[in-house]
Amino acid sequence: MSQPILQFIKTNNYKNLRLDEQVTIKNLNILIGTNGSGKSNLLSCLKFLKDCLTSLPDESRGISSFEDAVAKLGGNRILDSNVESPAKLGISYGFSQILQTGIPNQDSGILVLKLYVDKQTRVSIAEEYLYSGKDLHGLGLSQSFYYYHFHNRQAGKGTVTCSSSMVSDFFPSLDDIPINILGLLVLPRLLENSPFPPENAPVYKIRRELVEFITNWQFYNANNMDLHQIRTAEPQIGRSDIYLSSSGDNLPLVLDNLNQQNIDFEDSINEAMKLILPQTRRLRPIRSGRLSLTVEWYFEGIPEPFFLTDMSDGTVRMLCWATLLHSPVLPSLLVIDEPELGLHVAWMPILAEWIKQAAQKTQIIVTTHSPDLLDHFTDCLENVLCFASDNRTHFSIKPLSKAMLEPKLEEGWQLGDLYRVGDPSIGGWPW
């Protein structure tokens, strides 16, 4: 089975986003738009799916991962303010390369979540299903292949396909399907409690890969990077972290673990740091005491090392982004919100190049308000998604293209230039 890929996302009745058409997600995705235009809301839809599939460390308090994810998403305030409550809110996620070769002409799948939102009560799952919309036999047929379909006829009941043929047999209606836990998370238990062999269900064979793919997504917001913690934390040796935490406080541990995993990683990080501080001689994680780690930074002509407490905010931030983007074990989806914060303008082309290189190996979504960073994505306009609206209450997404901006590009404009002057073709001014 191939590595899954996030192919698109679509929403209905969700906050201020009107994504009635599928928004294609590529390997490199640069999101631009005014404050309040829905960029964070789109990222929250992706984080919501991961949170739904991530078990809570302590579920004994009676809150499921779905309920926790809904609370982070906004609770019962996630409904479009122009839609009367109660109503259904829909989010669809498209994936490619997840389905079994035994199902004819299928190489993509769509996970649909419909949430019942009542502003007076809790949010619950109204409907959930995974299907392929591909033509099953290449004959222009409109039939879809459903892997499972829960709650569509009655809450708590559903069906799972147990055949990959065109005429599919279904399990008898499954009972006791919870409406406060994602079906994709509890499918193994539901199938193993059924009277039929779980291995007969195609979804049983693909669910693990899909869940692993989604739970491997990593999200970072530059505003949440805790520079004090990054500088002063001395994480303990022995943990297996290979991704930065959301605050970045495990940086020395991640550097050490990646050095152990890949012989070239330390050289890669040192070369990256020489681009921003050319006098860098060597940077390395070292033991501080018996069980802890810190980072030493050596410069040409200076025998004594510097530590992260000696480095500027921007330098520490760039080290974090370099660690993420040069990693030999990139996440299946890497989301970075406003990475330009606190960085010198001279480092923008370096950061942009790191992002482009990492996007050759995995999927990356970056949001930015920096025209200086956007200038360096002028060569890949097709990867820029612009959030724009006519009425300033609801926003949709339009991908940019060379054809759309060609007259201005021929005059010598860069993408950041157009952003600086509030050109309406890329969203205009925020008022």
Image (cartoon, helix red, strand yellow):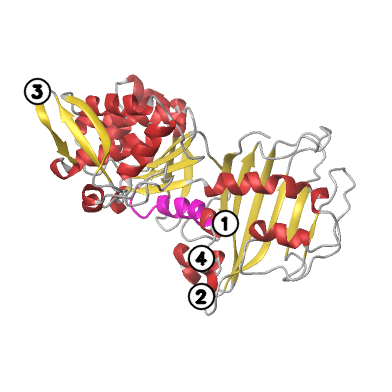
Residue in the foreground of this view, choosing between 73 and 427: 73
- Which residue does the numbered mark 3 point to in the structure image? 301
Which residues lie in the magenta part? 34-48
Looking at the rendered structure, the secondary structure element under dot 1 is helix
Q: CA distance from mark 3 to mark 1?
A: 51 Å
Can residue 431 be seen in this snapshot?
no
Whether pointer 2 and pointer 4 mark residues with C-beta atoms closer than 8 Å, the reply is: no
Image coordinates of residue 46 in percent, x first then y, are 51, 51
Using the image, determine if residue 160 lies above or below residue 238: below
Q: Nearer the viewer, mark 4 or mark 3?
A: 3
Q: Mark 1 or mark 3, which is nearer the start of the sequence?
A: 1
Q: Main secondary structure of the magenta part?
A: helix
Q: Nearer the viewer, mark 4 or mark 1?
A: 1
Q: Residue at x 35, y 38 (%)?
A: 256
Q: Which mark is residue 70?
A: 4
Q: State the residue lying farthest toward the bottom.
A: 120
- Which residue does the numbered mark 1 point to in the structure image? 53
- Which residue does the numbered mark 2 point to in the structure image? 61
Q: Which mark is residue 419?
A: none
